[in-house]
Image: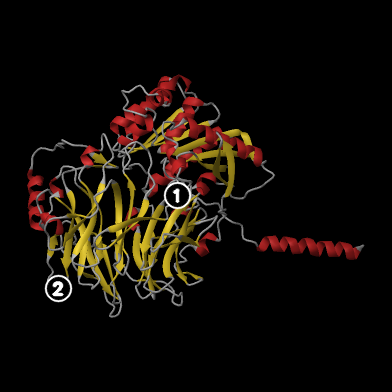
Amino acid sequence: MNKLLSLSFVLIFSVCSSLAQQPVLKTLSHEAMMSLKRVSAPKISPDGQWVIYSQQSVSYDTESNQSDLWLASADGSQSPRKITQTKAGEDNYFWHPSENQLFFTAKREGDESAQLYTLDLSSGGDAQRLSDFSLGIGSPQISADGNKILFSAKVFPGMFTDSLNRKQADEKKKLKYKARVYTTFPIRLWDSWLDEKQSHVFVLDFKTQQVQNVFRGISLVQSKGFQLGSFTWAPDQQSVVFTATIDQNTTAYQNSISKIYQVSIQGGKEKLLVDDTGDYSSIDFSKDGKYAVALGAPLNQTKIYQLNRLYRFSWPDMSNKTELVSSLDRPINQMEVSNQYILASIEDQGVDRLIRISLQDGTYQAVLGGQQGSYSQVSLSNLENVFAYQFNSMASPPEVLVHHSDKEVAISKANMAWLKNYDVKDPEVFWTMSRGKKIRSFLLKPASFDPAKKYPLFVLMHGGPAISFKDAYGYRWNPHVLAGTEYVIVMTDYTGSVGYGEKFAQDIQFDPFKGPGQEILDAANDAIKRFSFIDGSRQAAGGASYGGHLANWMQASTSHFKCLIAHAGLVNSEAQWGTSDYIWGRELMNGGAPWVPTKTWKEQNPMRFAANFKTPILLTVGENDFRVPINNTLENWSILQRQKVPSKLIVFPEENHWVLKAENSRFHYQEIRNWLATYLK
């Protein structure tokens, strides 16, 4: 008997010792989230030996934010090391095509605007400034011989030199009145009022130190609706190929169309390369110069969403237009072109995957990615099957890796050790039948999850609508911070989301809120039935942008939730049409202009159902938001106060459509969680 007791004590002691040795994982707080290192996209050297990337440390004291470039061996044999040390961060970094030399843009001490810098890794030393251009250096690209740089900059119309633009800027500063004058649409974008400036392409010659405006002789810039899209070196390295529209000023009543052009770097008249009904967003070339590859879509003035298609042309005559991967039916988010193939990141049912697309026949094969996590930001070297990329998931922020044939090498590892201390779970996927279709959702369990407990449910609704909830890391509405230890989170990709085929995204047209709202409710109810740890009597819903619209629709159409949260959400579709920076798509969504009595305008405008408003709701908005301007939130506030609905309004004077400043973000999260705690006790 004593032996049995002794053995029991030994077993109990062993179990307790084992438990004691296991670290207690922390809950991800806002402070912990903000302390993560933010790793940007990698650029691998042409010889496949080195990788550079930017790494940022964020502080609540914005003056203490730090961003620098890091260099690492691509095979992982040498740990990453910081190669810049200045207060100003670096952007637009890239490699010399044949030398061990880096380039980047930065606005360092004494710079009026972002300038081009170079860092010679062979000789060491500090970075050297290569430009002194008052307009700033944007989106730089180096020529194949390494002697010239293409870049973009904004100029006053008709003023093609730096000196003329300096003079015009000085003249404007002398004006004693302050006024904005417009004769065309649009007049503002995102968080800025537009002015008369245009983006042009310039070439900087390293040998002569001369800068020339490539667009000085083209007629396109004379159009009121001119707007530059993407641009790149042509294979001959003596000309630029670019996309541009000349009818941006017509977007109040139609979609603009962007075409492909070519112009010599010596200037002169532009050449229209493709004269069809395609609307092209970008163009690139195979490394051997045999093919041009463009992303675009057939122009359609009737659909709310168009999936970008991938086209191949023979170069230089731009003949034999061929659609590649015509059966893919998934968005291509980013790609790089080699001689024989295109390596592309695509969005597919809540994840980003990498695929290899043949330039010859358009077939494709999976490279990386599956059911979990997202792969993106690919960077090709000149070596076969050696490339860099980013991986991230809902549980881990982006890190840089390199693919060597069949081996994956972790490069940055900036947050791997840190994350081991925190209870951040991967989401679970479940599918719900709603309105005759399969709807995909993520379910995220809280930290310190106990399956024996009953947890309130927070239904998080994404914006867009043409985006999706992805298994990818986010800082603005991080579900782990929102969940804490208290809430189960459900995130549903309703009709209109992308990554499920073009038709699924298009089917939201004429049904912006009612159908998606029902799918979200059906998914929440399905989750409650499936998962016994959810307390169906305590539910809340919230979101931002289109998710905020949906929160206001829930206010108008159901009493299902104990409370709601709407950030940058419309309550009046008609006012949103008239004040947003983007209006034509809203007309397409609703089947006509607001003065046309369509069924959608009548039946799916939350304000028209204000008599039903009764659910406690938190409203938040950025005062500089021009996508969903503050007027909509103020209208909503007036309705709520008139209807005596328990509510709270928070206005962020410094923020736009997003809450980005660290202290503002912390306060925003705090208020959201306080609101949930008040009504989901």
Q: Are marks 1 and 2 in contact (CB under 8 Å)?
A: no
218 on left or right of 23: left
Q: In the image, residue 313 lies at what x, y percent? A: 30, 59
246 on left or right of 482: left
Up the image or down, 213 lies above or below 674; here it is below
Q: Which residue is mark 2?
A: 207
Q: Which residue is mark 1?
A: 329
Under mark 1, the amino acid is Asp
Q: Residue furthest bottom?
A: 123
Q: Secondary structure at mark 2?
A: loop
Q: Whole-Å distance between the Cαs marked 1 and 2?
A: 47 Å
- Depth check: give the residue in front, 56 or 167: 167
**Quick one: label 1 or label 2, which is nearer the N terminus?**
2
Q: Residue furthest right?
A: 1
Under mark 2, the amino acid is Lys
Q: Secondary structure at mark 1?
A: loop
**Split into 4 quadrants, where in the image is the C terminus?**
top right
The residue drawn where x is 51% and y is 47% is: 479
